[in-house]
Image (cartoon, grey):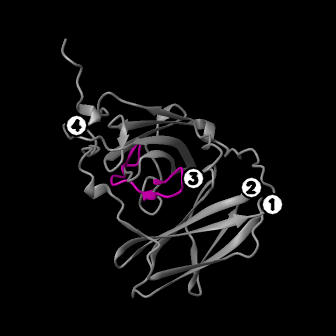
Amino acid sequence: MKTGSFFAAGLLVLLLVPHAYAELDLDKEVLVIPDTHNEKPYIWNVRTNPREYELIIEAGKVTAGKKHDFRFSVSSKEAGEIISPHVFITDDDLHEYAHIIPEKANGAYLFSYQAPKAGRYRFEIVFQSSKGWVNLRKDIKISGDDKAPEPAKISGDEDYQIKVRLIPPKAYAEHVVTLLYDISYKGAPLTDIEKVDGFDMHAAAWDEDLREFLYITPKQNLGGPEVPVNIVFMRPGRHAVFAEFRHKGVVRKVEFVLSVAAEPKNDPGSIERLMPADY
């Protein structure tokens, strides 16, 4: 993100910084909150734009405010099929967010998308291969009116209240941070989240320069009201975090900005080790 500012959230989100771990109901399956240094099982091991893959996206001239049909194909020197592809879209200023599961047809993948305003958009195509996750990305310039319309409100958004707790209370690059989403519906804890591809929630995050993209799903899917999303950000700085869940057949989006600090140094000469002089 070179200019502009991050989005304003659609649903009401209260970002909490707890002084302790979340209180858990031991009569239910216990939520597992990983240690902040136990990062390896939570790192999204993905290959970004590997040379052996070629992504071709066809859409013709794309104009803001109009729905367009997109077609993409992926060719690869690797043997094996593309498993469970997803499309994630944002704009240069991280105001826009879309997550689409494309349909396969005649050896290609199809999806529709309507950009709210003109500008450069980032398309992230992610899927699993025989060697693990692959992320192919492409920037597409969209013409038309560059003034963004007022965000459309989804009927019923006002019935949901969402608190997000950070565990630990500060996020560091290359360490696990758990975003614990606590979701209420009409003042009561939401306990019947509907699974999408087997998950309570899908989450995605970009840093402000669009250099780091992450796709995350919860390791525990208990149906609510708490949904833990464990993330390892590899780059410090501000990150736009988008999450979505489905309830009563409608997908609701949750958005906020998270600041990720550089990993603290532990060597004796680092500033964290400096102590006040004795007088």
* Residue ID for mark 3: 251
Measured Cα–Cα span from mark 3 to mark 4: 50 Å
Q: Residues within 10 Å of mark 2 (few under 14, many from 20)?
A: many
**Looking at the image, is mark 2 or mark 3 earlier in the sequence?**
2
The residue depicted at 70 percent of the width and 72 percent of the height is 69
Which circle, 3 or 4, is nearer the viewer? 4
Asked if marks 2 and 1 touch (Cβ < 8 Å), the reply is: yes
Amino acid at the residue labelled 4:
Gly
The residue lying toward the viewer, choosing from 5 and 231, is: 5
Residue bounds of the magenta highlight: 202-231
Measured Cα–Cα span from mark 2 to mark 4: 50 Å
Measured Cα–Cα span from mark 1 to mark 3: 28 Å
The residue depicted at 24 percent of the width and 44 percent of the height is 35
Q: Residues within 10 Å of mark 3 (few under 14, many from 20)?
A: few
The residue lying toward the viewer, choosing from 142 and 132, is: 142
Measured Cα–Cα span from mark 2 to mark 1: 7 Å
* Residue ID for mark 1: 144
Measured Cα–Cα span from mark 4 to mark 1: 55 Å
Query: Picture quarter containing residue 99?
Result: bottom right
Which circle, 2 or 3, is nearer the viewer? 2
